[in-house]
Amino acid sequence: MRSIWKGHIRFSLVTIPIQIFNAIETKNNISFNQLHKEDNGRVGYKKVCKSCDEVLASKDIVKGYEYQPDQYVIMESEELSSVKLKSKRAIDIEAFVDLNEVHPSRFESVYFIGPESEVAKQSFQLFKTALKNAGKAGVGKIVLRDREDVVLLVPEDDGMYMYKLRYPYEVRDIKKVPDVETVEIDEAQLKLAGTLIDSLSTTFDTLVFEDKYHEALLDLVNQKVEGKEIVSVSSETESKPTIDIMDALKASIEQAKSLKKGA
């Protein structure tokens, strides 16, 4: 595994050399190229001005911020460069918090953190163990790709996770979702719903997640590569919506019980 960033975790007078790794595996992702139907040539794209239809080169393009409809302020490259942040090659820890205080909507992407060298192992493990014993996560800031990001450092086994967090202004207010206001709930329905939840409750690590679309797509690609005939498989019939919620809850509970017995 190759690191994507090397630097330090820094808080108070403590400095720990670390390196950051991508936690997400992308090599197995299936992607397609757009090809010309006649000769299978790769399709390219030209940048065209929507006002005059002129094909533009990179030197003809500037960046503009639309502050009102069709009203732009032009930003020169030098101006944008003047506000870029230079990486200090450090994650500056600002506080320690309980992990459950951070709302899931704030999590954006995940990375791994490990010690930068053999010498750094002891200080890294000391920091990780201290966090684990305290039941805390470290909140800090790091400059990645000219932008300052807020990150959360979470101990995990012998290593650590680094979660890049969204800023509050990036997350919409759930109260603005239509029709989510509180309404009166039927107690009998609520009791049945609770029973259904109990009957389907398990631990997260026992669940098996399969990306059926990915597997089917990969199989389809392999068949194409091998020159085999492609066979279409009909999809399952969609279940009709049930109108009576009480009947639906009771039926669901019975189904959950039978599934549990079968398991």
Image (spheres, helix red, strand yellow):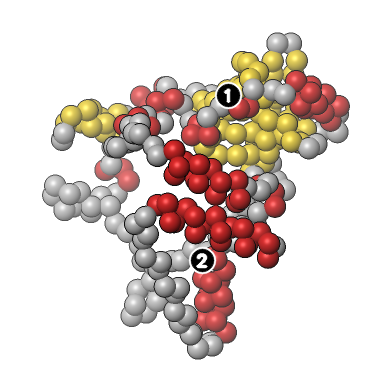
Where residue 186 appears, as percent x and y from the top left, is 40, 39
Sequence-first disc among 1 and 2: 1
Q: Taking the image as drawn, is residue 127 in sight? A: no
Where residue 237 appears, as percent x and y from the top left, is 42, 73
The secondary structure type at the circle numbered 1 is helix
Q: Residue at x 56, y 75 (%)?
A: 219
Front residue (pair 202, 165): 202
Q: Residue at x 73, y 31 (%)?
A: 155
Q: Residue at x 62, y 63 (%)?
A: 258
Q: Is residue 190 above or below residue 8?
A: below
Residue type at the position of mark 2: Tyr
Which residue carries the number 2 mark?
213
Image quadrant assignment for residue 122: top right
Q: Nearer the viewer, mark 1 or mark 2?
A: 1
In the picture as drawn, the residue positioned furthest to the top comes out as 12
Front residue (pair 140, 177): 177
Which residue carries the number 1 mark?
101
Image quadrant assignment for residue 162: top right
In the picture as drawn, the residue positioned furthest to the left comes out as 52
Left or right for 167, reference 43: right
Image quadrant assignment for residue 15: top right
Q: Is residue 100 above or below residue 242?
A: above
Q: Residues within 10 Å of mark 2 (few under 14, many from 20)?
A: few
Left or right for 149, reference 247: right
Give the spatial CA distance, label 1 vs label 2.
Answer: 35 Å
Residue type at the position of mark 1: Glu
